[in-house]
Amino acid sequence: MTYVRPRLPRRHLRQGLLIAAALTTAALVTGCQSDTGSGAAAPLSLGGLTGTADKMPDGGASTCPLPYDMAAAAKAAGLEGAVGPGPVKADGDPVATAEGGKRAKPGEPLAENPGVLVSCTFHIGKDDVEVHTVATGKPQALAPLAPVIQRLSGASVDELVAYLKQAGGAEAGKAVVTGSGNVAAVRLKLDGDGDASLLVGLGEAGAGSPDRTKQAGDLAGALAGQLP
């Protein structure tokens, strides 16, 4: 399947197979929240997130299937402006898409290191916000998103390799921001084995201001903190 939305990762994952392979041979395994019947959300796990991704229609979904409260996260990060699903300029493309799981094809990163990725688009004020939740059975889960990180941040290959090493080795819950100041990753804790990360792209690269860098990190940290 080919995603319609150019900002979401399927096309970029395929275009970046060589980059991802050069950086790591790791694979994805992740989990998601689900209803336990008691009103409590289940811990993030490979099986849960895979189930969420597999249930998503091939053409994507009009809402994010993960329980992110973008308005609350934006407030915590000090970001102002209207908050909602989808990009600032609605174009009819899906708000959410999924990779891996039953959709994984031989040779793709999420098949080589079996795992899953759920991607959602929001907007805050004039900025589009991409939120990618990814997990792998083996480290590091962030590696298959190397082409996405490069697209969002404009990083060179050397900068990309250094960033993946830094973000992939960070403590769970700690946001690591790219030099461009608009992309942040947070390693997530999984219930069970595996490695998982949350990647957030806030607007365009190049702002580079200390305030924007802090906001990107705070936004990613706030979203990660919403997961059980």
Image (spheres, rainbow, N blue to C red):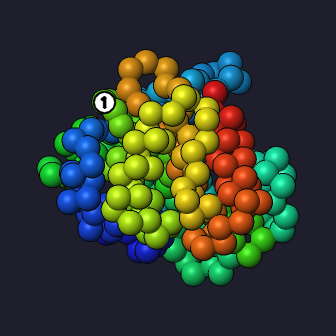
Give the position of the N terminus as an image quadrant.
bottom left
Which of the 4 quarters of the picture holds residue 134?
top left
Number of dots carrying numbers: 1
Residue 173 left/right relative to 125: left
Residue 187 versus residue 40: which sits nearer the camera? 187
How far across and down, in percent of the image, does residue 197 sit?
49, 40
Q: Is residue 61 visible?
A: no
Could you say which quadrant of the image residue 15 lies in? bottom left
Q: Position of residue 71 (x, y in %)?
A: 79, 54
Q: Secondary structure at mark 1?
A: loop
Circle 1 is placed at which residue position? Answer: 138
Q: Residue furthest left?
A: 106
Q: Position of residue 86 (x, y in %)?
A: 63, 68
Residue shown at the point (61%, 32%) measured from the top left: 173
Residue 153, compared with residue 165, is above or below; it is below
Depth check: 227 or 76 in front?
76
Q: Residues within 10 Å of mark 1 (few under 14, many from 20)?
A: some
Q: Answer above or below: position of 188 versus 88.
A: above
Q: Is 113 situated left or right of 128 in this image?
A: left
Residue 12 in view: yes
Q: Is residue 189 left or right of residue 16?
A: right
**Quadrant (top left, top right, bottom left, bottom right) of the C terminus:** top right
| Residue type beneath disc 1 | Lys
Residue at x-position 35% and y-position 47%: 143
Q: Residue at x 84, y 68 (%)?
A: 81
* In the image: residue 113, left or right of residue 154: left
Give coordinates of residue 46: x percent, y percent: 41, 30
Quadrant position of residue 63: bottom right
Residue at screen point 71% across, 24% down: 39
Depth check, front residue: 226 or 200:
200
